[in-house]
Amino acid sequence: MSTLRQRHAQEDVASILDESEQDAVIQELAAQSARARRQTQLCVTPLGACLALLYLYFAGQALVDPWSIRHHAELRDVLRPLAIAAGDLGSSIAVAAGTWAVAAYCNQSEHHGRAILRPAVVLATLMAVFWSLGILKMLRLRGFVLDGAWRMFWLPAAPAVWTLITLSVINTVGAVERDLRALRAARYRFRHI
């Protein structure tokens, strides 16, 4: 009669993969990781590009016809058209930089992806502060009445939320890649023991 410990040891030996099976598992995980990178890039990049283009359109409209867009008209009393255009342009750049960071990271350029993301996060934070101050000034002039101002809360939130989403995507993809590298390194060390 074998003890419980001996039975577990026998099960562990039976569950160990040989070298070719380990290589196959690592290759399959690498293929799944590559597919996930492509799918992430195909989902995130078009959404970010659309949001960046929307902000770019808003910036152009602020210069051409300053008060034709509703949220620009709401800020008429507190911001000049050039300031609104600069805010929209900054938001567009922040969103585009976050999108570019994900695209670079998913194309195996991890260092460049993170390097691009840092200024995007800073710029998105600055734009959130800019738009929040504009909305706060507008509310103060109106006596803090929220009749139509609640529709404008997306202005400070959108670039910041987008860069947080891109940061989360990059961290998730990076964690999978780190785990895969650790698995390969453990496999390499095991071969040389």
Image: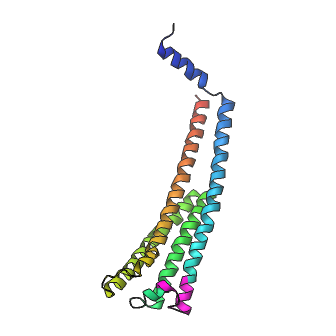
Q: Is residue 68 magenta?
A: yes
Residue 125, image x and y in percent? 42, 71
Residue 66, image x and y in percent? 51, 91
Part of the protein shown in magenta: 58-71
What number of labels is visible? 0
Toward which corner of the image does residue 28 lie, by quadrant? Answer: top right
Q: Is residue 69 left or right of residue 49?
A: left
Q: Is residue 1 above or below residue 191?
A: above
Instruction: Evaluate whether residue 119 shows in this view.
Output: no
Report the residue that reaches farthest toward the bottom.
65
Residue 80, image x and y in percent? 44, 91
> Depth check: 154 or 131 in front?
154
Colour basis: rainbow
- Give the residue at x 44% y 70%: 122
Q: Is residue 53 above or below residue 111?
A: below
- Give the residue at x 67% y 46%: 31
> Depth check: 7 or 144 in front?
144
Q: Is residue 151 left or right of residue 102?
A: left
- Give the residue at x 58% y 69%: 48
> Depth check: 166 or 73 in front?
73
- Give the residue at x 61% y 65%: 45
Report the residue that reaches farthest toward the top.
1
Q: Is residue 32 left or right of residue 89?
A: right
- Say which quadrant the C terminus sits in: top right
Q: Is residue 1 above or below residue 164?
A: above
Principal secondary structure, stretch drawn in magenta: helix
Residue 123, image x and y in percent? 46, 73
Instruction: Evaluate whether residue 23 shows in this view.
Output: yes
Q: Is residue 73 magenta?
A: no
